[in-house]
Amino acid sequence: MKILLVEDNEMNRDMLSRRLQRKGYDVLIAVDGAAGIESAQTESPDLILMDMSLPVVDGWEATRRIKADESTRQIPVIALTAHAMAGDREKALAAGCDDYDTKPIELPRLLGKIEALLATDVV
């Protein structure tokens, strides 16, 4: 399974990508929202982990564009944010995210969300 990690923080990106690779996922990296949109279109990942505070195009807008595009709208998106404020989950879902998780990442919790979304995607 191919996961696109859209994350601008190098430390978060390296840590999470290594942990996902150890779990057997093929991890693609994008460092800003514009690159995330492009990678979603060209690489057709099975799932996207989207940081919401990104340069160039933020995660909210990147998700809206991915979900508006016929070729990428079926890809599940999990919002990742350090700004766990009241209403953020609802805002992420309204932007088109399929789920939401907070930073710092708790890998078992995130893996549960990834596995649940990938399981519903199986035809």
Image (cartoon, rainbow, N blue to C red):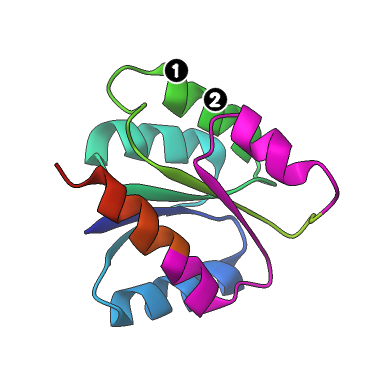
Q: Secondary structure at mark 1?
A: helix
Q: Secondary structure at mark 2?
A: helix
Residue occupying the point 32% across, 31% down: 74
Residue 64 numbered tag: 2
Task: Classify 2 as above or below 107.
Answer: above
Q: Quadrant of the N terminus?
A: bottom left
Determine whether label 1 and label 2 are within 8 Å by CB: yes
Residue occupying the point 37% across, 58% down: 116
Q: Residues within 10 Å of mark 2 (few under 14, many from 20)?
A: some
Gap between marks 1 and 2 measured at Cα: 6 Å
Residue 117, percent across and down?
Answer: 37, 51
Residue occupying the point 49% across, 78% down: 108
Residue 102, percent across and down?
Answer: 67, 62
Residue 56 in sight here: no
* Residue at the extreme right of the image, as rendered: 86
Nearest the eye: 75 or 29: 75
Nearest the eye: 40 or 74: 74
Q: Amino acid at mark 2?
A: Arg
* Residue pointed to by mark 1: 68
Q: Amino acid at mark 1?
A: Ala
Q: Residues within 10 Å of mark 1 (few under 14, many from 20)?
A: few
Residue occupying the point 61% across, 29% down: 95
Q: Quadrant of residue 3?
A: bottom left
Residue 25, percent across and down?
Answer: 27, 68
Q: Is residue 57 magenta?
A: no
Q: Is residue 70 left or right of residue 16?
A: left
Span of residues in magenta = 85-112
